[in-house]
Image (spheres, grey):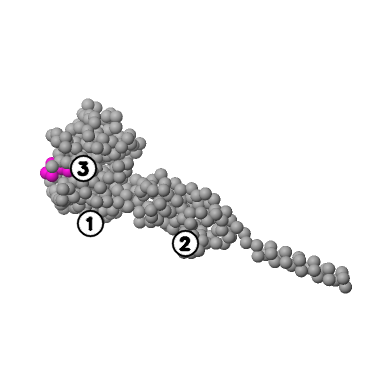
Protein backbone atom coordinates (compact mmCIF):
# COMPACT_ATOMS: atom_id res chain seq x y z
CA UNK A 1 0.00 0.00 0.00
CA UNK A 2 2.86 2.28 0.89
CA UNK A 3 4.50 1.54 -2.46
CA UNK A 4 1.26 2.29 -4.28
CA UNK A 5 1.02 5.69 -2.59
CA UNK A 6 4.60 6.43 -3.56
CA UNK A 7 3.95 5.55 -7.17
CA UNK A 8 0.85 7.76 -7.27
CA UNK A 9 2.83 10.69 -5.77
CA UNK A 10 5.56 10.31 -8.41
CA UNK A 11 2.95 10.18 -11.15
CA UNK A 12 1.40 13.43 -9.94
CA UNK A 13 4.82 15.14 -9.94
CA UNK A 14 5.50 13.91 -13.46
CA UNK A 15 2.16 15.21 -14.72
CA UNK A 16 2.84 18.56 -13.07
CA UNK A 17 6.21 18.83 -14.77
CA UNK A 18 4.75 17.87 -18.13
CA UNK A 19 1.95 20.40 -17.69
CA UNK A 20 4.44 23.17 -16.91
CA UNK A 21 6.48 22.32 -19.99
CA UNK A 22 3.37 22.28 -22.12
CA UNK A 23 2.31 25.78 -20.93
CA UNK A 24 5.80 27.31 -21.04
CA UNK A 25 5.85 30.58 -23.10
CA UNK A 26 8.61 30.88 -25.71
CA UNK A 27 10.18 34.35 -25.74
CA UNK A 28 11.90 35.83 -28.81
CA UNK A 29 14.36 38.69 -28.64
CA UNK A 30 14.08 41.86 -30.76
CA UNK A 31 17.49 42.66 -32.18
CA UNK A 32 18.75 46.26 -32.73
CA UNK A 33 17.22 47.64 -35.92
CA UNK A 34 19.02 48.75 -39.07
CA UNK A 35 17.67 51.97 -40.64
CA UNK A 36 19.13 52.93 -44.02
CA UNK A 37 18.29 56.60 -44.53
CA UNK A 38 20.89 57.68 -47.11
CA UNK A 39 18.16 59.22 -49.27
CA UNK A 40 16.05 60.63 -46.46
CA UNK A 41 16.41 64.39 -45.96
CA UNK A 42 13.71 65.70 -43.62
CA UNK A 43 15.94 65.56 -40.56
CA UNK A 44 15.30 64.60 -36.98
CA UNK A 45 16.45 61.41 -35.29
CA UNK A 46 14.99 58.32 -36.88
CA UNK A 47 13.87 55.45 -34.68
CA UNK A 48 11.47 52.53 -34.83
CA UNK A 49 8.39 52.35 -32.63
CA UNK A 50 6.89 48.95 -31.74
CA UNK A 51 3.45 47.93 -30.55
CA UNK A 52 2.48 44.50 -29.26
CA UNK A 53 -1.04 45.55 -28.26
CA UNK A 54 -2.57 46.22 -31.71
CA UNK A 55 -1.45 49.86 -31.76
CA UNK A 56 -2.85 50.90 -28.38
CA UNK A 57 0.66 51.94 -27.31
CA UNK A 58 4.11 52.16 -28.89
CA UNK A 59 7.58 51.81 -27.46
CA UNK A 60 11.06 52.24 -28.86
CA UNK A 61 12.18 49.09 -27.05
CA UNK A 62 10.00 46.04 -26.55
CA UNK A 63 12.99 43.97 -25.53
CA UNK A 64 11.36 40.60 -26.23
CA UNK A 65 7.92 39.22 -26.97
CA UNK A 66 6.09 35.93 -26.75
CA UNK A 67 6.15 33.68 -29.79
CA UNK A 68 3.22 34.26 -32.12
CA UNK A 69 2.73 37.88 -31.08
CA UNK A 70 1.82 40.27 -33.91
CA UNK A 71 4.05 43.35 -33.62
CA UNK A 72 3.33 46.65 -35.41
CA UNK A 73 6.35 48.71 -36.45
CA UNK A 74 6.56 52.29 -37.73
CA UNK A 75 9.28 54.94 -38.21
CA UNK A 76 9.40 58.21 -36.28
CA UNK A 77 11.81 61.14 -36.70
CA UNK A 78 11.45 62.49 -33.18
CA UNK A 79 8.58 64.79 -34.18
CA UNK A 80 6.22 62.76 -36.31
CA UNK A 81 5.63 59.35 -37.83
CA UNK A 82 6.80 59.02 -41.42
CA UNK A 83 4.09 58.41 -44.03
CA UNK A 84 3.95 56.68 -47.41
CA UNK A 85 2.79 59.95 -49.00
CA UNK A 86 6.19 61.55 -48.42
CA UNK A 87 8.60 58.61 -48.22
CA UNK A 88 9.20 55.20 -49.73
CA UNK A 89 9.83 52.20 -47.49
CA UNK A 90 11.53 48.86 -48.06
CA UNK A 91 11.24 46.34 -45.21
CA UNK A 92 12.39 43.36 -47.28
CA UNK A 93 15.50 42.89 -45.11
CA UNK A 94 13.38 42.20 -42.02
CA UNK A 95 13.10 38.67 -40.61
CA UNK A 96 10.59 37.22 -40.05
CA UNK A 97 9.01 38.91 -43.06
CA UNK A 98 6.46 41.70 -42.67
CA UNK A 99 2.99 41.88 -44.17
CA UNK A 100 3.79 44.66 -46.71
CA UNK A 101 7.37 45.55 -47.63
CA UNK A 102 6.37 48.96 -49.01
CA UNK A 103 4.07 50.18 -46.23
CA UNK A 104 4.82 52.96 -43.75
CA UNK A 105 3.60 50.78 -40.87
CA UNK A 106 4.04 47.03 -41.01
CA UNK A 107 3.00 44.00 -39.00
CA UNK A 108 5.22 41.01 -38.31
CA UNK A 109 4.28 37.87 -36.43
CA UNK A 110 7.18 37.08 -34.14
CA UNK A 111 7.82 33.36 -34.52
CA UNK A 112 11.60 33.69 -34.36
CA UNK A 113 14.20 36.22 -33.28
CA UNK A 114 13.13 39.57 -34.80
CA UNK A 115 15.66 41.53 -36.85
CA UNK A 116 14.29 44.71 -38.43
CA UNK A 117 15.88 46.35 -41.45
CA UNK A 118 14.23 49.21 -43.34
CA UNK A 119 15.34 51.55 -46.11
CA UNK A 120 13.67 54.97 -46.23
CA UNK A 121 13.89 57.52 -49.05
CA UNK A 122 12.27 60.81 -49.97
CA UNK A 123 9.52 60.77 -52.56
CA UNK A 124 9.98 63.74 -54.87
CA UNK A 125 7.50 65.49 -57.13
CA UNK A 126 8.15 67.51 -60.28
CA UNK A 127 6.96 71.11 -60.12
CA UNK A 128 6.78 73.84 -62.78
CA UNK A 129 6.12 77.58 -62.68
CA UNK A 130 4.24 79.91 -64.99
CA UNK A 131 6.32 82.78 -66.31
CA UNK A 132 3.32 85.12 -66.39
CA UNK A 133 1.72 84.91 -62.95
CA UNK A 134 4.28 83.10 -60.78
CA UNK A 135 1.92 80.21 -60.06
CA UNK A 136 3.61 76.88 -59.29
CA UNK A 137 2.09 73.51 -60.16
CA UNK A 138 2.90 69.87 -59.65
CA UNK A 139 3.24 68.11 -62.99
CA UNK A 140 2.46 64.45 -63.61
CA UNK A 141 5.37 62.88 -65.45
CA UNK A 142 3.10 60.39 -67.22
CA UNK A 143 0.72 62.83 -68.94
CA UNK A 144 1.74 66.37 -67.99
CA UNK A 145 -1.37 67.00 -65.90
CA UNK A 146 -1.02 70.06 -63.67
CA UNK A 147 -2.21 70.53 -60.10
CA UNK A 148 -2.15 74.05 -58.73
CA UNK A 149 0.09 74.80 -55.73
CA UNK A 150 0.74 78.48 -54.99
CA UNK A 151 2.91 81.44 -55.99
CA UNK A 152 5.80 82.55 -53.79
CA UNK A 153 5.83 86.16 -52.68
CA UNK A 154 8.32 89.02 -52.35
CA UNK A 155 7.59 92.29 -50.56
CA UNK A 156 3.89 91.52 -50.49
CA UNK A 157 3.60 90.68 -54.19
CA UNK A 158 3.68 87.44 -56.12
CA UNK A 159 7.18 86.57 -57.32
CA UNK A 160 6.85 86.62 -61.10
CA UNK A 161 9.01 85.29 -63.91
CA UNK A 162 10.85 82.57 -61.99
CA UNK A 163 13.63 81.26 -64.22
CA UNK A 164 16.18 79.21 -62.32
CA UNK A 165 14.77 77.20 -59.42
CA UNK A 166 16.32 74.55 -57.17
CA UNK A 167 15.90 73.19 -53.65
CA UNK A 168 19.09 73.41 -51.59
CA UNK A 169 19.01 70.51 -49.12
CA UNK A 170 21.91 71.84 -47.08
CA UNK A 171 20.27 75.23 -46.58
CA UNK A 172 16.71 73.85 -46.46
CA UNK A 173 15.46 76.56 -48.77
CA UNK A 174 14.81 77.20 -52.44
CA UNK A 175 17.13 79.30 -54.60
CA UNK A 176 15.50 81.10 -57.50
CA UNK A 177 16.21 83.64 -60.20
CA UNK A 178 13.76 85.77 -62.16
CA UNK A 179 13.82 86.88 -65.78
CA UNK A 180 14.67 90.37 -67.02
CA UNK A 181 11.02 91.40 -67.27
CA UNK A 182 10.75 90.92 -63.52
CA UNK A 183 13.95 92.50 -62.28
CA UNK A 184 16.40 89.68 -62.86
CA UNK A 185 16.70 88.96 -59.15
CA UNK A 186 18.45 86.22 -57.21
CA UNK A 187 16.46 84.97 -54.20
CA UNK A 188 16.17 82.41 -51.47
CA UNK A 189 12.67 81.19 -50.57
CA UNK A 190 11.50 79.75 -47.26
CA UNK A 191 9.46 76.61 -48.12
CA UNK A 192 7.31 77.01 -45.01
CA UNK A 193 6.37 80.69 -45.28
CA UNK A 194 6.60 80.87 -49.12
CA UNK A 195 8.42 84.21 -48.71
CA UNK A 196 11.34 85.18 -50.96
CA UNK A 197 14.41 87.14 -49.85
CA UNK A 198 16.61 89.07 -52.27
CA UNK A 199 20.07 87.85 -51.33
CA UNK A 200 22.62 90.15 -52.95
CA UNK A 201 22.19 93.79 -53.92
CA UNK A 202 25.38 93.64 -55.95
CA UNK A 203 23.86 91.28 -58.50
CA UNK A 204 23.07 93.90 -61.08
CA UNK A 205 25.44 93.15 -63.94
CA UNK A 206 24.32 92.87 -67.56
CA UNK A 207 24.21 89.07 -67.24
CA UNK A 208 21.84 89.12 -64.29
CA UNK A 209 18.61 88.98 -66.28
CA UNK A 210 19.83 85.83 -67.99
CA UNK A 211 20.65 83.57 -65.02
CA UNK A 212 18.76 80.73 -66.57
CA UNK A 213 19.34 77.75 -64.31
CA UNK A 214 20.78 76.72 -60.96
CA UNK A 215 22.39 73.52 -59.67
CA UNK A 216 23.63 72.91 -56.11
CA UNK A 217 27.24 71.74 -56.03
CA UNK A 218 28.61 69.09 -53.60
CA UNK A 219 30.31 71.87 -51.58
CA UNK A 220 26.91 73.64 -51.21
CA UNK A 221 27.80 76.44 -53.64
CA UNK A 222 25.24 77.35 -56.30
CA UNK A 223 26.25 76.78 -59.91
CA UNK A 224 24.47 79.14 -62.31
CA UNK A 225 24.41 79.62 -66.07
CA UNK A 226 23.73 82.68 -68.16
CA UNK A 227 23.93 83.11 -71.90
CA UNK A 228 27.69 83.48 -72.04
CA UNK A 229 29.23 82.31 -68.77
CA UNK A 230 29.06 79.98 -65.81
CA UNK A 231 28.86 81.71 -62.43
CA UNK A 232 29.40 80.20 -58.99
CA UNK A 233 27.79 81.69 -55.90
CA UNK A 234 28.05 81.09 -52.19
CA UNK A 235 24.89 80.26 -50.29
CA UNK A 236 24.70 83.95 -49.30
CA UNK A 237 24.41 84.95 -52.96
CA UNK A 238 27.88 86.44 -53.25
CA UNK A 239 29.51 85.57 -56.55
CA UNK A 240 32.75 83.66 -56.50
CA UNK A 241 34.50 82.59 -59.65
CA UNK A 242 33.17 82.50 -63.19
CA UNK A 243 34.35 80.91 -66.40
CA UNK A 244 33.47 80.80 -70.05
CA UNK A 245 32.80 77.38 -71.64
CA UNK A 246 33.78 79.07 -74.89
CA UNK A 247 37.37 78.81 -73.70
CA UNK A 248 36.99 75.08 -74.35
CA UNK A 249 35.33 75.61 -77.70
CA UNK A 250 31.71 75.39 -76.50
CA UNK A 251 29.51 77.96 -78.21
CA UNK A 252 26.41 77.58 -76.11
CA UNK A 253 23.66 80.14 -76.19
CA UNK A 254 19.98 79.97 -75.68
CA UNK A 255 17.70 78.01 -73.40
CA UNK A 256 20.29 76.48 -71.11
CA UNK A 257 18.49 73.76 -69.24
CA UNK A 258 20.89 72.35 -66.66
CA UNK A 259 21.17 69.26 -64.45
CA UNK A 260 23.94 67.65 -62.41
CA UNK A 261 25.68 64.78 -64.17
CA UNK A 262 25.62 61.23 -62.80
CA UNK A 263 29.04 61.53 -61.15
CA UNK A 264 28.02 64.87 -59.54
CA UNK A 265 31.22 66.62 -60.58
CA UNK A 266 29.63 68.84 -63.20
CA UNK A 267 26.48 69.52 -65.18
CA UNK A 268 24.84 68.75 -68.47
CA UNK A 269 23.64 71.93 -70.17
CA UNK A 270 21.11 71.79 -72.98
CA UNK A 271 20.76 74.67 -75.43
CA UNK A 272 19.36 75.48 -78.83
CA UNK A 273 21.44 74.39 -81.80
CA UNK A 274 21.03 74.26 -85.55
CA UNK A 275 18.10 71.93 -86.26
CA UNK A 276 18.60 70.09 -82.96
CA UNK A 277 19.08 70.39 -79.21
CA UNK A 278 22.75 70.39 -78.27
CA UNK A 279 24.30 69.55 -74.92
CA UNK A 280 27.60 70.39 -73.29
CA UNK A 281 29.30 68.79 -70.31
CA UNK A 282 30.61 71.45 -67.95
CA UNK A 283 32.65 70.40 -64.93
CA UNK A 284 32.56 72.23 -61.64
CA UNK A 285 36.27 72.80 -62.27
CA UNK A 286 35.48 74.80 -65.41
CA UNK A 287 36.49 72.17 -67.96
CA UNK A 288 33.89 71.87 -70.74
CA UNK A 289 33.32 69.51 -73.63
CA UNK A 290 30.66 68.82 -76.22
CA UNK A 291 27.89 66.43 -75.25
CA UNK A 292 25.35 64.60 -77.34
CA UNK A 293 23.07 66.13 -79.97
CA UNK A 294 19.46 65.34 -79.08
CA UNK A 295 17.99 64.94 -82.54
CA UNK A 296 15.59 62.01 -82.17
CA UNK A 297 12.18 63.49 -81.34
CA UNK A 298 9.51 60.91 -80.55
CA UNK A 299 5.79 61.68 -80.68
CA UNK A 300 6.12 65.45 -81.08
CA UNK A 301 3.73 67.41 -83.30
CA UNK A 302 4.85 66.97 -86.90
CA UNK A 303 5.59 70.68 -87.27
CA UNK A 304 8.21 70.40 -84.51
CA UNK A 305 9.91 67.22 -85.68
CA UNK A 306 11.17 69.02 -88.77
CA UNK A 307 11.71 72.41 -87.17
CA UNK A 308 13.72 71.89 -84.00
CA UNK A 309 15.56 75.18 -84.32
CA UNK A 310 12.49 76.75 -82.71
CA UNK A 311 12.92 74.65 -79.54
CA UNK A 312 14.74 76.09 -76.56
CA UNK A 313 15.28 73.82 -73.55
CA UNK A 314 14.36 75.75 -70.41
CA UNK A 315 14.91 73.26 -67.59
CA UNK A 316 15.80 69.65 -66.78
CA UNK A 317 14.67 67.72 -63.69
CA UNK A 318 15.17 64.16 -62.50
CA UNK A 319 12.27 62.08 -61.17
CA UNK A 320 12.39 59.44 -58.42
CA UNK A 321 13.10 56.63 -60.87
CA UNK A 322 16.08 58.47 -62.38
CA UNK A 323 14.28 59.54 -65.56
CA UNK A 324 15.04 63.07 -66.73
CA UNK A 325 12.37 65.48 -67.97
CA UNK A 326 12.67 68.72 -69.91
CA UNK A 327 10.68 71.87 -70.61
CA UNK A 328 11.05 73.15 -74.18
CA UNK A 329 9.85 76.58 -75.26
CA UNK A 330 8.78 77.17 -78.86
CA UNK A 331 9.68 80.75 -79.73
CA UNK A 332 7.53 80.59 -82.84
CA UNK A 333 4.22 79.42 -81.34
CA UNK A 334 4.99 80.46 -77.72
CA UNK A 335 3.95 77.00 -76.54
CA UNK A 336 5.84 75.00 -73.93
CA UNK A 337 6.42 71.26 -74.43
CA UNK A 338 6.98 68.76 -71.65
CA UNK A 339 9.07 65.72 -72.62
CA UNK A 340 11.17 62.89 -71.29
CA UNK A 341 14.80 63.07 -72.37
CA UNK A 342 17.29 60.23 -72.74
CA UNK A 343 20.84 61.55 -73.05
CA UNK A 344 22.38 58.16 -73.85
CA UNK A 345 19.89 57.51 -76.66
CA UNK A 346 19.97 61.18 -77.79
CA UNK A 347 16.18 61.24 -77.82
CA UNK A 348 13.21 63.14 -76.40
CA UNK A 349 9.75 61.64 -76.02
CA UNK A 350 6.83 64.05 -76.14
CA UNK A 351 4.36 64.10 -73.22
CA UNK A 352 2.25 67.27 -73.40
CA UNK A 353 1.87 70.86 -74.64
CA UNK A 354 1.08 73.99 -72.64
CA UNK A 355 -0.16 77.11 -74.41
CA UNK A 356 1.76 79.36 -72.06
CA UNK A 357 5.38 79.84 -71.08
CA UNK A 358 6.77 77.70 -68.29
CA UNK A 359 10.37 78.39 -67.31
CA UNK A 360 11.13 76.41 -64.18
CA UNK A 361 11.07 72.66 -63.70
CA UNK A 362 12.38 71.14 -60.48
CA UNK A 363 12.21 67.97 -58.41
CA UNK A 364 11.39 68.67 -54.76
CA UNK A 365 10.57 66.49 -51.74
CA UNK A 366 6.88 65.84 -51.18
CA UNK A 367 7.18 66.91 -47.57
CA UNK A 368 7.73 70.51 -48.72
CA UNK A 369 4.54 70.75 -50.74
Is residue 250 among the parts visible in the rendering? Answer: no
Q: Residues within 10 Å of mark 1 (few under 14, many from 20)?
A: few
Residue 333 located left or right of residue 294: left
| Earlier-in-chain disc, 2 versus 3 | 2
User: In the displayed structure, does residue 82 sit left or right of residue 186?
Assistant: right
Q: Mark 2 or mark 1: name the one nearer the start of the chain.
A: 2
Crowd band around label 3 with a 10 angstrom C-alpha radius: few (<14), some (14–19), many (20+): many
Q: Kindly report the distance in space between the C-alpha atoms of the residues bearing marks 2 and 1.
A: 39 Å
How far apart are the two marked residues, 1 and 3, measured between alpha carbons?
22 Å
- The correct choice, above or below, for 31 with respect to 257 in the image is below
Residue behind mark 1 = 148
Residue 242 visible in image? yes
Question: Magenta residues, as a range?
Answer: 176-182
| Residue at which label 2 appears | 57
Few, some or many C-alpha atoms within 10 Å of disc 2 (few <14, some 14-19, many ≥20)? few
Q: Is residue 18 above or below residue 218?
A: below
Q: Residue at x 28, y 36 (%)?
A: 221
Amino acid sequence: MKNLKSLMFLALISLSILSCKKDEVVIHEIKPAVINADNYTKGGTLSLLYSSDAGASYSADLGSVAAGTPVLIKVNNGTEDLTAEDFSFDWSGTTPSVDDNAAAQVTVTVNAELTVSVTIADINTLIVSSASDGQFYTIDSSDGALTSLYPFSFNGNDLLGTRGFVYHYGQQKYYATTDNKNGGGFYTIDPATKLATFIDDEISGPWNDAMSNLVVMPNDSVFASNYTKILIFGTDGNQGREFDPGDNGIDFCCGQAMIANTSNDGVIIGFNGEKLIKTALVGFDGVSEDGSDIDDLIGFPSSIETNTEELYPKAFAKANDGSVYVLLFNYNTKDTYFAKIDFSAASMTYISTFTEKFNSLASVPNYLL
